[in-house]
Image (tube, grey):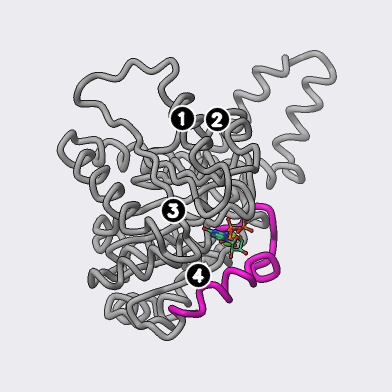
Amino acid sequence: MHDVPSLVAQAREGRPRAVARLISLVEGASPQLREVMAALAPLTGHAYVVGLTGSPGVGKSTSTSALVTAYRRAGKRVGVLAVDPSSPFSGGALLGDRIRMADHASDPGVYIRSMATRGHLGGLAWAAPQAIRVLDAAGCDVVLVETVGVGQSEVEIASQADTSVVLLAPGMGDGIQAAKAGILEIGDVYVVNKADRDGADSTVRELNHMLGLGESRGPGDWRPPIVKTVASRAEGVDEVVEALEKHRAWMEERGVLAERRAARAAREVETIAVTALRERIADLRGDQRLGVLADRVASGSLDPYAAADELVSGLTQG
Ligand SMILES: Nc1nc2c(ncn2[C@@H]2O[C@H](COP(=O)(O)OP(=O)(O)OP(=O)(O)O)[C@@H](O)[C@H]2O)c(=O)[nH]1
Ligand SMILES: [Mg+2]
């Protein structure tokens, strides 16, 4: 068992080992998690959470690393969370990221953490927000969340960020992929990376076209900017930071930031509640209440809906 108050105090002072240990408690779904989260709650709400999504190899990690450099130059404390929803292990696929992040490894103003979430009940939706809370409470001004892998998880992680950055690269058929993945609805800022390659301008045009279609934006609405970058040479990265800051200011002005955070909190609570219920339902397999109800349903003295209702009300009464 960990001494939670002391861990939290150390994390708050910015001690990396305490931060790492707290995130491990999240990853391991520790029974002490409740205590940890209760202690962290009053310390959260400061960090600006930026999600980075995009197809494999588009340059998310390289961009993340360049953004870390830019934010560090501005004196900000930065947390980086690389989330891999497809793998039950930390490591492996994330090894390359660690190497790319090596520049920042000795910087005490940067926390970098990889997280595999497949093994979790409730998966990414449940674990990542808790890890973000840890980084927030540890005093990070900015938390960058990179999702490895494609598909639903990207949309999921986008819903956990204050601002979502969608990366594309020329010549990857990304425009079409993006449309398919529903990514065009989640981007607050679009980045066309690998602008040193042919076709960047046409990717920008294509994207512009797609973003403009079917849009009925009002004068005060946010229009997602498209920024060209060469992340491997840190070109365009300051423009990305500028776009992020503009989006953040726009959200604050309009009350959107508070709205998004409340929506995020609602989903967080919902996920935790559903996970708890699912655990209880799993416990029921060997429970005699289910057996008794099943016998009645089998013999025709009770219908299955009434039996399920009875079971559910039993669950929520503890
Ligand atoms: N030419 C060029 N290559 C780049 C640029 N940015 C990144 N790369 C290279 O593209 C490759 C993939 O970059 P990553 O940053 O690992 O991409 P990623 O999106 O994090 O990849 P996954 O995490 O595997 O999905 C690496 O070899 C980078 O060096 C760029 O602007 N131009
Ligand atoms: Mg990566």
* Residue on which disc 1 sits: 185
Q: What's the mark number on residue 229?
A: 3
At 32% across and 38% down in the image, what residue appears? 260
Label 1: few (<14), some (14–19) or many (≥20) C-alpha neighbours in 10 Å:
few
Q: Residues within 10 Å of mark 3 (few under 14, many from 20)?
A: many
Does residue 231 appear anywhere in the picture? yes
Task: Specify the farthest residue to the bottom.
Answer: 106
The answer to which image quadrant residue 237 occupies is bottom left
Q: Quadrant of residue 99?
A: bottom right
Q: Earlier in the sequence, mark 2 or mark 3?
A: 2
Task: Give the amino acid at mark 4.
Answer: Arg
Report if residue 190 lies within the magenta region: no
Q: On the picture, is 170 further left or further right than 188?
A: right
Distance from Cα at disc 4 to Cα at disc 1: 28 Å
Residue wearing tag 4: 113
> In percent of the image, x 25 and y 26: which residue is there?
221
Identify which amino acid the numbered label 3 is placed on: Thr
Amino acid type indicated by mark 1: Glu
Give the spatial CA distance, label 2 vs label 1: 6 Å
Residue identified by numbered label 2: 182
Q: Earlier in the sequence, mark 4 or mark 3?
A: 4
Dot in front, 2 or 3: 3
**Which residue is the extreme one toward the front?**
198
Which is more N-terminal, label 2 or label 4? Answer: 4
Instruction: Measuring from the top left, give residue 273's x and y in whole percent.
Output: 49, 42
- Which label was assigned to residue 235? none
Depth order, front residue of 171/191: 171
Report the span colored magenta: 83-104
Which of the four quarters of the rendered structure image does ligand 2 lie in? Answer: bottom right
Q: Are marks 2 and 1 in contact (CB under 8 Å)?
A: yes
